[in-house]
Amino acid sequence: MTMLHVVDHALLAHRLAELRDAATPSPRFRKLLAEIGAILTLEATRALPSRIARITTPLTEMDHQVLAAPEPVLVAVLRAGLGLMEGGMQVLPEAPVGHVGLVRDEHTLKPSQYMLRMPPEVRSRGAILFDPMLATGGSAVAAVQRVKEAGAPSIRFVCVVAAPEGVAKLSAAHPDVPIYTASLDEKLDHRGFIVPGLGDAGDRCFGTV
Ligand code: PRP
């Protein structure tokens, strides 16, 4: 079963339109990516397990819904995931943070890992993984694998644009991982770029070419 959530939100769509725009400069791109990351994090955490706690308002006592466990660990897939996770850190400022460094070879489209740092809390809390692009899915499959190997009992994958090929590959390799995206785009082109997409998120985020 594909656990794909295409998040439908007017503010998200509005920001995504500007993010996709080829004329959007790098500083604005980073800001939009963070705002989109915050909205997607709210959706990805909508159904976090909760419990009922007794609280005291200035007027009375009442039973109230609170989180049953500490928030999940936030993990960025470098580099572009940093920009998206920025918004996740605003929504969950207390969450520990991990990093997976992956770079995709532009010819073979295969990802290779250059770094991995994971906080120990990932073993008890699970993780939200951030990467703006789910293209062939090779990077996402590898990143989820690394976070599972670090001991995460549950993982949610958050991206901005997803290609059908990437969704199929990630769902086949890790059917337990729900995918939250702002858009399911049309296809990949011959270079493995998402179409219509938003270009190379890492380069646009950090002003590299
Ligand atoms: C991009 C993107 C994903 C990956 C998606 O990163 O941010 O990590 O490619 O492609 P895939 O689904 O086909 O694996 P890139 O390798 O360009 O690195 P960067 O973020 O450092 O630019």
Image (tube, rainbow, N blue to C red):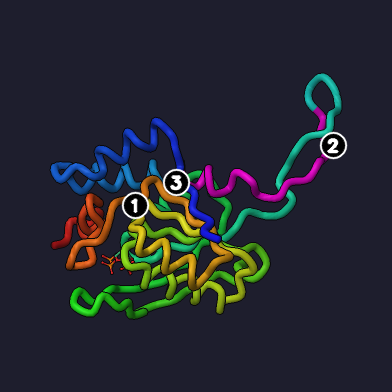
Up the image or down, 175 lies above or below 145; here it is above
To which residue does mark 2 refer? 54
Tell me, yes or no, if residue 89 can be seen here: no
2 vs 1, front mark: 1
Where is residue 59? Give x, y as percent. 82, 19
Left or right of 144, for residue 161 = left
| First in residue order: circle 3 vs circle 1 | 3
Quarter assignment of residue 36:
top left
> Can see residue 100?
yes
**Amino acid residing under circle 3:** Val
| Spatial CA span between label 3 and label 1 | 9 Å
Q: CA distance from mark 2 to mark 1?
A: 41 Å
Residue under the image location 50 percent in, 75 percent down: 145
Q: Position of residue 92 (x, y in %)?
A: 55, 48
Residue bearing the label numbered 3: 6
Q: Amino acid at mark 2?
A: Arg
The residue sitting at 56% across, 69% down in the picture is 119
Image quarter where the C terminus lies is bottom left
Where is 75 relative to 109, above or below?
above
Residue at disc 2, secondary structure: strand
The span picked out in magenta is 37-56
**Proximity of marks 2 and 3: CB atoms separated by less than 8 Å:** no
- Residue to which mark 1 is pinned: 161
